[in-house]
Image (cartoon, helix red, strand yellow):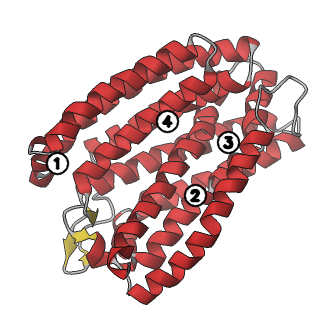
Amino acid sequence: MAHYLPDIWAAIIAFAVLTYVVLDGFDLGVGIMFPFLGSDDNRTRAMNSVAPVWDGNETWLVMGGGGLLAVFPLAYGVILNALYVPLIVMLLALAFRGVAFEFRGKTRRWRPLWDKAFFGGSLVATLAQGAVLGGLLQGPSVTGRTFSGGPLDWLSWFSLGTALALVAGYVMLGAAWIVLKTSDDLYDRARRFGEKALLITLVFILLASLATPFLNPEYFRRWFAFPGILLSALVPLLLLLCGYGYWWAIRSDRGLVAYLSGIGIFILSFIGLGLSIFPYIVPTSITIREAASGAASQMFVFVGAVIFLPIILSYTAYAYWVFRGKTSEHDHHHY
């Protein structure tokens, strides 16, 4: 089993990152839509819809980052140095957003300020996450076993595009969540947002799919050589199917179907990312096995993951089950 531990851990970390994206993505999307939801009551209802689960969603971010440090310390060091600026901006924005989330319900006088802070923190955190993705795909400069580039190497037209794409994708998820959880005017606004965000997201995915193979000759070979070309042909068809499912569902008061279709779009995009970089963990420089810590360290942390991962999954599922259904005007959680 020790031989396969790096691959197992890569799968666990990928699962944690994807789970974070699809869960925290919708509440970041709600935050991005916040100034455009109309009345103060609409904004309160939107915030109430994510109040029971939003901070638990960030558990997966901690797990992904902690797992990377524990099991792939070499990759952690390179990625942190290469993407230090957007990562720090993301963490500060998430902290600022959390403060705004808590303080908004404690005051009437300063509520407009905290509304803006909630929006700003959500938008900046999302842009930073997209920039991290774009910067990672570009492949940090590595000499030997260390990062040899500059602090702004991640900044490019491609990382800007991935940042904007993630904003559209999160708004798409957030709109589906509001449709699932609310009704009336807030529902109508979210439905219109969702329709526009879906189209923008699909356009950005198309542009990214056209650009990614040309970032690196290795990407081009993987996408257009057998068997990668089979996935390159299949994934767009599945994306269109998920896009149609989202479009139909959000116009038919099928919020859950719309949300699951949005998740499908993210999963398929994640598969495309995996096709580009596997088996590298730092694209085209350091493989999963090269970055892995010793087998004993991996096994020690793996035992903890086997114990706690089902617990995290269970309480996450339980929280969503308990707070299922639409949020009424009177279901305020003091926000």
Where is the N terminus found, in terms of image quarters?
bottom left
Q: Position of residue 221 (x, y in %)?
A: 9, 49
Q: CA distance from mark 4 to mark 2?
A: 16 Å
Q: CA distance from mark 3 to mark 2?
A: 23 Å
Tell me, yes or no, whether the two marked residues, 1 and 2, touch with CB atoms within 8 Å: no
Question: Which residue bears the numbered disc 4?
Answer: 263
Q: Which residue is more in the foreground, 199 or 100?
A: 199
Q: CA distance from mark 4 to mark 3?
A: 27 Å
Question: Which residue bears the numbered disc 2?
Answer: 60
Query: Residue 305 vs residue 297: left or right?
Result: right
Query: Residue 206 vs residue 81: left or right?
Result: left
Residue at 31 percent of width and 57 percent of height: 136
Query: Residue 12 vs residue 318: left or right?
Result: left
Tell me which label, 3 or 2, sits earlier in the chain.
2
Q: How many numbered marks have been drawn onto this rendered protein structure?
A: 4
Q: Which residue is more in the foreground, 258 or 113?
A: 258
Question: Which residue bears the numbered disc 3?
Answer: 117
Amino acid type for the residue under numbered disc 3: Ala
Q: Quadrant of residue 51?
A: top right
Tell me which label, 1 or 2, sits earlier in the chain.
2
Q: CA distance from mark 1 to mark 3?
A: 36 Å
Q: Which residue is more in the foreground, 241 or 160?
A: 241
